[in-house]
Image (spheres, rainbow, N blue to C red):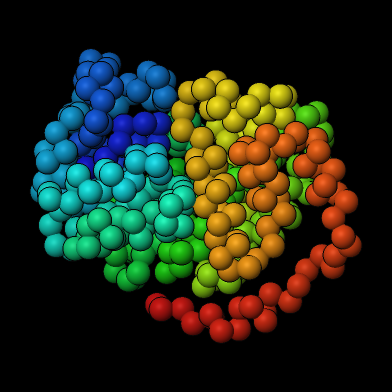
Amino acid sequence: MAKVGIIGAGSWGTALSWLLHNNGNEVTMWSVMEEEINMLKEFHEQKDKLPGVILSEDTVFTTDLEEAATGRDVLVLAVPSPFTRSTAGKLAPYVKDGQKIVNVAKGIEEQTLMPLSEIIEQEIPNANVAVLSGPSHAEEVGKGIPTTIVVGAKDKETAEYLQTLFMSNVFRVYISSDVLGIELGAALKNVVALAAGMADGLGYGDNTKAALITRGIAEIARLGIHMGGRIETFYGLTGIGDLIVTCASVHSRNRRAGMLIGKGATMEEAMKEVKMVVEGVYSAKAGYGLARKYQVPVPIIEQVNRILFEGKPAAEAVTELMLRRKKVENIDLRQLYQNSVEIPW
């Protein structure tokens, strides 16, 4: 049995609390919002964000970050990506040397273009930071629906420890050393999911969505390989797998926000309607910034930015994508990949 602190009591933090307790671990959940913790103490249920998932009576709920962090074998950082840096900074004084921290949020910081694991390492340099990602909606994980994800870590011992911690008969865990590739796939698929939602809102069909998914993963892989990620990561669970589920699922807040925009809502109106953090909006600018930095073409991500931040009509963006100059479908990715095939473990 491990002692686990869940930092963040939203839908994903709640689902992972349920999972980890069912795996026999001692779980403490933290939220900065007192009303959220009071609700969890009274009902043992995240009624606002994950109704129907009942947490155990011995799960501890607290607004005291020191209580949540001290003496834990593992900390799971489950706050929305825009709050990763600030939360990590507040957490730092209570983190022991070598503390395992698993980041489960998905995003890229707009100002610095840093993935979230690097932000945590910058704020808590004495921590051992890993990531967990994959096609895993909290609504399904909290119901025990079979799910498969990936843990990424810099050393194999940490990856295998976390694999054992999270794995169950309904939650299969793979491991990888490609932390960067995992995080890029996780963050940028949300941007493509916004585009897929916009297509739904415009009334387009399966052909359009299939095109967005396949060309979207091509963009993500192109950029990721230029940055040092591994090609197999982008065609695995945290790339194409997560992209498919986020573009198609009724649980996807990014797809839902995109649908509202496709129907004529502004980005601000869509985010207000969804009532939860729409990670793709925050990752869109950062993703486009990375593409410009590495001089990689990302036409779908570029058009999503134009729609979100410049008021471009979604239908006009689709037309522009369709009428781009003629292209060969696939470049030889081996030429990009040949210098980055070494796997650390």
Say which quadrant the C terminus sits in: bottom left
Using the image, determine if residue 233 lies above or below residue 316.
below
The single residue placed furthest to the top in the displayed view is 42
Q: Nearer the viewer, residue 115 or 97?
A: 115
Using the image, determine if residue 20 lies above or below residue 328.
above
**On the picture, is 178 further left or further right than 250?**
left
**On the picture, is 110 further left or further right than 83?**
right
Residue at the spot x=30%, y=55% of the render?
120
**On the picture, is 211 further left or further right than 345?**
right
Q: Give residue 109's position: percent from left, percent from top.
A: 43, 51
Q: Nearer the viewer, residue 21 or 307?
A: 307
Q: Is residue 176 visible?
A: no
The single residue placed furthest to the front in the displayed view is 310
Using the image, determine if residue 15 lies above or below residue 294.
above
Q: Is residue 265 visible?
A: yes
| Number of marks in the rendered image | 0
Q: Give residue 200's position: percent from left, percent from top.
A: 74, 31
Residue at the spot x=23%, y=48% of the render?
89
**On the picture, is 339 further left or further right than 296?**
left
Residue 162 falls in which quadrant of the image?
bottom left
Q: Nearer the viewer, residue 94 or 145?
A: 94
Using the image, determine if residue 343 lies above or below residue 314.
below
Q: Give residue 224's position: percent from left, percent from top.
A: 57, 65
Q: Give residue 134's position: percent from left, percent from top.
A: 50, 50
Residue at the spot x=46%, y=28% of the render?
276
Residue at the spot x=42%, y=24% of the render?
49
